Image: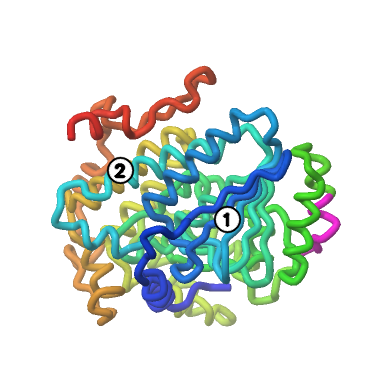
Amino acid sequence: MVFIGVESKIQSINQMAQEVVIPNEEVVLGEELDHVRLITLNRPRQLNVISSKVVSLLADYLERWEKDNKAELIIIKGAGRAFSAGGDLKMFYDGRKSKDSCLEVVYRMYWLCYHIHTYKKTQVALVHGISMGGGASLMAPMKFSVVTEKTVFSTPEASIGFHTDCGFSYIHSHLPGHLGEYLALTGARLNGKELVAAGLATHFVPSEKLPELEKRLISLNSGDKNAVKSAIEEFSVEVQLDEDSVLNKKSIIDECFSKDSVAEIIKSFEAEASKEGNGWIGAVLKGLKRSSPTGLKITLRSIRDGRKQTLPESLKKEFRLTMNILRASISEDVYEGIRALTIDKDNAPKWDPPSLDQVEDEKVDLVFQPFKEDLEVLIPEKEESRWHGKYETTPYATSK
């Protein structure tokens, strides 16, 4: 499936996600069931968007349970009809006039992403409905990620002047061929079958069987990976891609999205669009050409860098990119993109610079420059200090 109408999709999601939050609402539920721990993202009316509170609670639960010898199996799911729609764009927009207003939640999220990727206990994500951007970072790295026919995945950040983040510059760069560049630059969406086929999820289970699978995992009461895998396979089915799936267009994607620059990618894609049977390309091209030129250039470089980087290096890079983009270091496109999509809803962003050839490589270089060592995300790679590096121990917090 091709993500046609990325802008309208993000807009509808954010309109639903920006409802008033009840102050005392438990945004994340954590249940302890003998050897099983169950996390429920609990903002169904907001499509389980990720807020600062959500990030803090997830980190607290995961640290406590990794250190708890009784906890063996961690299950995470979303309440309602979404797994998680990712971060709330309006939060970024509302903080645009305040210096580094979103720095804390950004830092905590990337620090958390590392711990999710490297978690010591068996994790299962039950992914039903929307799983976008940062929300998908709670799915893709898990030992087991179960999707359904109603799962919808995408990483559409580049289209609004942002970049593919929350570990996806690393994840996408390690997908087969140049599928990662395609997903990151176009915001293409994948369904449940495609996620399994692409290696972004491990099992496909029909949605009507998901509650029964959850009960089975809880009754299993064990984190033994083979036992968990066998339990999931009692409910899972083999995936057969639809004939028109974008994953069946691998040769075209690899040919076009292997080019050195965004401009060359678009030119190559245009050439393919003129060939018989390639009608699907037109809508994708239209979306690409409407996207932020700055966002596209930053995203392509980030994915390409990810091929040569470790996970910690990728997360540190993403933190720099996010903070430089939110600081409008070289462009205010991210705020213009959010404005056009979710504030004024005119879907007519005015990018600055307005075209790819006007986005100077030297300026793009600036947002990739390393920060001072103590201002980077502190990724604790030594086992004995695994849960060190929290935001409150950084100069960002202590200098307030």
Residue at 61%, 52% (x, y): give it: 76
CA neighbours of label 1 inside 10 A, class few (<14), some (14 to 19), many (20+): many
Image-quadrant location for residue 333: bottom left
Q: Which residue is mark 1?
A: 40
Q: Is residue 142 left or right of residue 337?
A: right
Magenta stretch encompasses residue 44: no
Query: What is the quadrant of the C terminus in the image?
Result: top left
**Amino acid, disc 1:** Thr
Secondary structure, mark 1, is strand
C-alpha separation, residue under disc 1 versus residue under disc 2? 23 Å
Q: Of helix, strand and loop, which mostly describes the magenta segment? A: loop
In this picture, which residue range is highlighted in magenta? 231-239
Q: Which residue is mark 2?
A: 104
Residue depicted at x 38% and y 67%: 267
Question: Residue 261 at what x, y percent from top left?
Answer: 36, 55
How crowded is the residue under tag 2: few (<14 C-alpha within 10 Å), some, or many (20+)? some
Which marked residue is nearer to the observer: mark 1 or mark 2? 1
Type of amino acid at the residue the image marks with label 2:
Glu
Residue at position x 70%, y 36% from top?
72
Q: Position of residue 304 (x, y in %)?
A: 43, 45
| Above or below: residue 242 compared with residue 388 | below
Q: Earlier in the sequence, mark 1 or mark 2?
A: 1
Residue 348's spot in the image, x, y percent? 24, 79
Q: Is residue 233 magenta?
A: yes
180 is higher (above) or lower (below) than 370: below
Q: Which mark is residue 106?
A: none
